[in-house]
């Protein structure tokens, strides 16, 4: 970083620090965050950008990586205004022009709604609307595990980012994925749909169970969660436990792919409830413990067969902290053909979700299975 002689020592050190951070972020493929820092440098020290092409060149690299090719070309032309014969800038300009000519038009906004109104997209939309309707906090904190990276899989990241962009008040959306390639593909897809939405998403690359706790701690409470990452049941349960522990009173968790998953080389064992293979049994057990009379001394109503029998499983389950914490939650299974999703939350917001789903574009095509005892619980005030 040269050409900083016109600013004070303190400001110079800060700009050098920002530049170093931006370069490290770009090296780590976090192009959106890197671009924010480059733009900040350009705004704070405009004389630097007018005298050296380096900032705009590195901005152009980030813009190209994010698919924002028109802006990238403009930044490169600013570089060439300073140094018309710069070989790096000329080469990058050719690459950008070439990528613009080859750019696919798969994800343009005009066809998004028509192509993606499947069960996943509508469930996510209806769930977010229900949460916002019931919320009294004035905030909308959203979180997903497993970002979108293929156009035929519901575009969850786009739908959440678009919803968050239209929310008022405090809002935040964090998307976690283990694969850097998935995040890169997701950013490119967002750019094709609406590049402005990139600023609504904080992408985090890494192992979900390592990243979730600090993210949730910083959020405080989370209003909306989509779990659609890896399909190892224990990992999925761990993600659900962490999310449920920070779920707002009017929040919802959506777990995708509840259908049976066949064994794979990565996980060569049965998964009868897909990504919810361990989550659903926990919810069923927690609900049973909530509605049962085992702790109230009313076991006689079950008859002599159960009256004198103590289930070891139930006894141990009744002392499980996780199951106790899940006792206030209810769940709904939404299915279309072989595709099933699990929606989890408290009765009020789940009821709002049911109402919205009943008038949604897919209402005639899906089956909705609420938790077995939801109505039974509502009819008994002593629970």
Image (cartoon, helix red, strand yellow):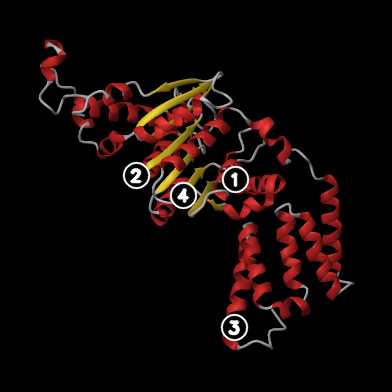
From the viewer's side, name the closer residue of 333 and 309: 333
Quadrant of the rendered structure where residue 14 is? bottom right
> Mark 2 against mark 1, which lies toward the viewer?
1
Judged from the image, the secondary structure of the residue bearing numbered disc 4 is: strand
CA–CA distance in space, label 3 to label 4: 35 Å
In the picture of the structure, the residue carrying the numbered disc 3 is 11
Q: Answer with left or right where residue 57 lies relative to residue 26.
A: right
Badge number at residue 179: none
> Mark 3 against mark 1, which lies toward the viewer?
1
CA–CA distance in space, label 2 to label 4: 14 Å
Judged from the image, the secondary structure of the residue bearing numbered disc 1 is: helix
Q: Answer with left or right where residue 379 lies relative to residue 166.
A: left
| Nearest to N terminus: mark 1 or mark 4 | 4
Badge number at residue 162: 1
| Nearest to N terminus: mark 2 or mark 1 | 1
| Residue 106 x, y percent position in the rendering | 75, 38
| Residue 261 x, y percent position in the rendering | 51, 24
Badge number at residue 245: 2
Quadrant placement of the C terminus:
top left
């Amino acid at each position: 970083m040269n050409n900083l002689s016109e600013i004070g020592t303190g400001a110079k050190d800060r700009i050098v620090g920002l530049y170093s951070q931006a370069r490290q972020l770009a090296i780590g493929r976090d192009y959106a965050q890197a671009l924010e820092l480059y733009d900040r440098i350009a705004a704070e020290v405009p004389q630097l950008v007018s005298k050296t092409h380096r900032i705009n060149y590195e901005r152009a690299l980030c813009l190209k990586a994010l698919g924002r090719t028109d802006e990238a070309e403009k930044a490169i032309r600013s570089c060439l205004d300073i140094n018309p014969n710069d070989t790096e800038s000329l080469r990058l300009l050719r690459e950008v022009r070439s990528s613009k000519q080859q750019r696919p038009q798969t994800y343009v906004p005009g066809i998004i709604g028509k192509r993606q109104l499947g069960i996943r997209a509508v469930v996510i939309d209806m769930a977010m609307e229900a949460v916002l309707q019931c919320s009294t906090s004035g905030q909308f904190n959203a979180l997903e595990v497993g970002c979108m990276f293929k156009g035929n899989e519901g575009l969850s990241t786009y739908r959440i980012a678009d919803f968050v962009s239209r929310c008022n008040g405090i809002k935040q959306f964090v998307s976690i994925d283990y694969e850097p390639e998935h995040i890169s593909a997701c950013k490119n897809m967002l750019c094709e749909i609406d590049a402005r939405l990139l600023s609504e998403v904080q992408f985090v690359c890494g192992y979900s169970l390592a990243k979730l706790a600090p993210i949730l701690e910083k959020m405080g409470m989370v209003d909306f969660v989509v779990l659609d990452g890896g399909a190892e049941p224990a990992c999925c349960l761990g993600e659900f436990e962490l999310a449920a522990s920070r779920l707002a009173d009017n929040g919802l968790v959506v777990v995708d792919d509840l259908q049976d998953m066949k064994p794979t080389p990565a996980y060569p064992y049965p998964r009868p409830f897909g990504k919810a293979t361990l989550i659903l049994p926990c919810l069923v057990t927690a609900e049973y413990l909530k509605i049962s009379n085992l702790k109230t001394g009313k076991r006689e109503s079950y008859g002599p067969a159960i009256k004198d029998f103590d289930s070891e499983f139930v006894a141990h389950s009744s002392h499980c902290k996780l199951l106790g914490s899940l006792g206030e939650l209810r769940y709904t299974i939404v299915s279309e053909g072989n595709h099933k999703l699990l929606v989890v939350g408290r009765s009020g917001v789940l009821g709002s979700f049911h109402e919205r789903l009943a008038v949604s574009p897919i209402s005639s095509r899906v089956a909705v299975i609420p938790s077995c005892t939801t109505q039974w619980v509502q009819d008994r005030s002593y629970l």
